[in-house]
Image (cartoon, grey):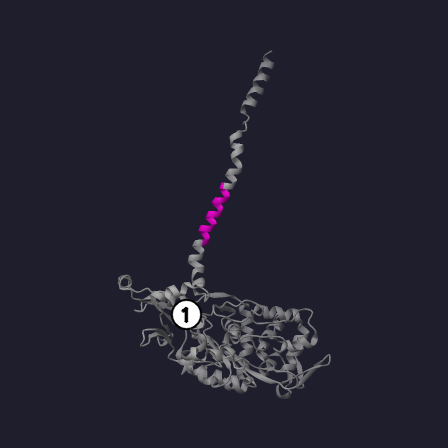
Amino acid sequence: MKRSEKHLNRMFRKKAGRKRKDPVQSRNKPYAIVSYMFVAIFISLVGWLVYFNLVKSEEFINSPYNTRQDTFADRVIRGSILSSEGEVLAATQTAEDGSEYRYYPYGSMFAHVVGYDSYGKSGLESEANFHLLNSHAFFLEQMKNEFMNEKNKGDNVVSTLSVKLQTAAYNALGDRKGAVVAMEPSTGKILAMVSRSDFDPNYLEENWDYLASDEENSSLLNRATQGQYPPGSVFKIVTALGYLRQHGTVEGFSHDCQGEITKQGHTITDYDHIAHGPVDLRSAFAYSCNSAFVEIGVQMGGRALRQAGESLLFNKKLPLTMDYKSSVLSVDGKSVVPLMMQTSIGQGDTLVSPMHMAMMVSAIANQGTLMRPYLIDRVENYSGDQVKKYMPDAYRELIPSSEASVLAGLMKEVVDYGTAASLGGQGYTVAGKTGSAEYGEGEIKDSHSWFVGYSNVEDPDLVVSVIIEGGGSGSESAVPVAGQIFNSYYY
């Protein structure tokens, strides 16, 4: 009897310990889920608003399609754009009738990089629009101007551009179509950017219809960032990188150059049919021997060459804040021999901009790491007080420092005894690569003239990228332009 009582007591305690389901709680569960969802949506919206205001608002305000800009201009006098030394590159002036207009003291010299502020915006006028239409004048002064219904003075943007280098590059190009980019490899500062044909932004309104329809000169196009050119022999930097990765060294290669090479019925000639004779990879690079690099490229294959190119940002987005065209490299593991022959020497379907070439060489000069190129050094209010400072920023390592060192050595020999030897013997050292890129249809072809390189090889100071449309060989046209820019930098 006692055992039965104990057993019943245990059963009752067990049942009493069980939680009974609350019917009210069961009915409220769907409402709780919905409530959590609304809380999550609310938090997401708050997060987006914070992100938009801190990160994206400037981009939207800078958009030429955003009519909010007109509101800014109604109460702020657009600020000035200055060079790194403080010279005025763009400023707002007032006409006799009281209307405001932009004045560009250097005319066409900075036309593309500084840009214009009518018929839309371009260049720094677009990139810095948010800053130029904001005012950080003393708050009491702003309050007074608001009370008097007068405009506040907008902030000034101090660029990284050097008038001295820009003038040298502009004059060196002369009347020839082409582009120049000069930048610091260790910081990413763009010191000069010239594009020709050009235009005078002071007379843009009068000449707009002509400029917008002139396909022959494409004067509104910034060739430095938006021009797409066959790279010619400057692409041999990429081909050499592919060989280095396959073999672990650039030693051991040999080729007997006869001035041309034929494979599967397709013939590639060297410039002026020059036969270089026996060459290794170093001398082939220095003399820009086409037949040797055709041999290298065909043996390497399209897949390896594409991988080398894409590590240097071909077929990739570029870390640029300005408008640009991406570079194109079309070979892959299925590419036929004739296309590989062409692509190995920078012909075929390959296209690149002078800005991209400057970035490639900057990474090589900076031990493989690319610094983000930038044009704005700082923002100041009209009294000169600093509002915002832009600092150098590493984009990422494009290639290991060991590979960069080998490529730098090859480029040094181009100046020591190769196709850019005229840049030697100065008070500074130079490493670089020349190029002659064929273009045109049928039998009638011409060549663009290329040079890319950097100065002070042991501790690089300046990268220069030059293209001259129809300029012939790189040695004849682009190298002298680069030489004038280097001389202007040092002397």
Foreground residue among 98 and 283:
98
Amino acid marked by disc 1: Ile
Residue at the (49%, 65%) spot, across then down: 395
Q: Quadrant of residue 381?
A: bottom left
Image quadrant where one finds the C terminus: bottom left
Foreground residue among 73 and 163:
73
The majority secondary structure of the magenta stretch comes to: helix
Q: Position of residue 46 (x, y in %)?
A: 44, 50
Residue marked by disc 1? 376
Q: Position of residue 423 (x, y in %)?
A: 49, 84
Q: Secondary structure at mark 1?
A: strand
Which residue reaches farthest right? 264
Residue 80 is a magenta residue: no
Q: Position of residue 434 (x, y in %)?
A: 55, 81
303 left or right, relative to 366: right
Image: magenta residue range: 35-48
Residue 393 shows in the view: yes
177 left or right, relative to 150: right
Q: Quadrant of residue 117?
A: bottom left
